[in-house]
Image: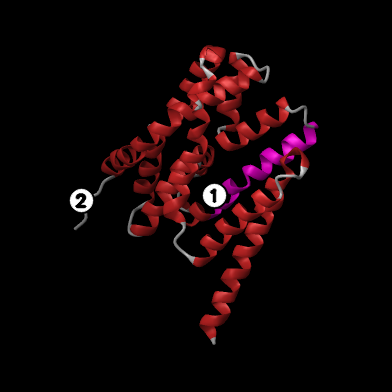
Amino acid sequence: MSTTTSKSSFWQGLRDGLPFILVIVPFSALFGVVATEAGLNVYETLAFSVVVIAGAAQFTAVQLMMDNTPTIIVILSALAVNLRMAIYSASLAPYLRDAKIWQRALVAYGTVDQSYALSAAKYENEPDMTTAQRLAYFSGCLVPVLPLWYGFTVVGALGGKAVPDSWALDFAVPLCFLAMIGPMLRTLPHLTAALVSIAAALGFTWVPFNLGLLIAAFLAMVAAVQCESFLERRSKT
């Protein structure tokens, strides 16, 4: 008989999310610094984090703004980087179909890379979890992430130029994504998408306005779908 409760699921999610503090703190502080250097004040920087709540898209948008990129390109690039959230939502939806609308709305807002990576793995490994336990686990994952993301965005914005360039805090961005993506590359389509995206992103660095990133993302999705279709056809023969 399972002794798992919603309360224990919440605490399990919180414990699982704690390691992300190591990357959330420098990552959010770095965004605060970069945003103020791009001309945003502290309130605008905090509002950016609260409303968008997507580090990679925020960095992309701010960097393009600093490069005086046309607004439409800034918007499209940020949306493209955040397109993965739609995939995340589609992946979590079957597990939370019995949740109330307002609960699903909150999950949609709180769906970030960290909460998704942990929750998707948990739901898959423990299919007998109830909807309440799943929601509790998801909420627990967010506790070490969201408050620190907001708070250290402000710290970075207030600290601003006091942070020496030699600290090179931008290491946190790729480190965070490597920590999340690495364990998820468990199938051939996953690996195909990763390899194609890396090769294409490097190959299209010459494309202006960082549009090479959009091209790489599109090619990676096509390659993954084709790989999965090939494997399905082969399994039927």
Placement of 65 over or under 139, stated as above or below = above
| Mark 2: amino acid | Thr
Q: Where residue 73 sits: x, y (%)?
A: 77, 37
Q: Which residue bears the numbered disc 1? A: 89
Q: Where residue 61 sits: x, y (%)?
A: 67, 32
Residue shown at the point (41%, 48%) measured from the top left? 119
Q: Are marks 2 and 1 in contact (CB under 8 Å)?
A: no
Asked if residue 213 lies left or right of residue 131, the reply is right
Asked if residue 2 lies left or right of residue 89, the reply is left
The image's colouring method is secondary structure
Q: Which one is in front, 122 or 218?
A: 218
Q: CA distance from mark 2 to mark 1?
A: 29 Å
Mark linked to residue 3: 2
Disc on the earlier residue, 2 or 1: 2
Residue shown at the point (51%, 17%) measured from the top left? 164
Magenta part of the chain: 70-90
Can residue 54 be seen in the rendering of this structure?
no
Q: Residues within 10 Å of mark 2 (few under 14, many from 20)?
A: few
Q: Where residue 16 sits: x, y (%)?
A: 33, 42
Which quarter shows the N terminus? bottom left
The quadrant where residue 165 appears:
top right
Is residue 38 shown in magenta?
A: no
Tell me the mark number nearer the camera, choosing from 2 and 1: 1
The quadrant where residue 67 appears:
top right
SS at mark 2? loop
Residue shown at the point (68%, 41%) measured from the top left? 79
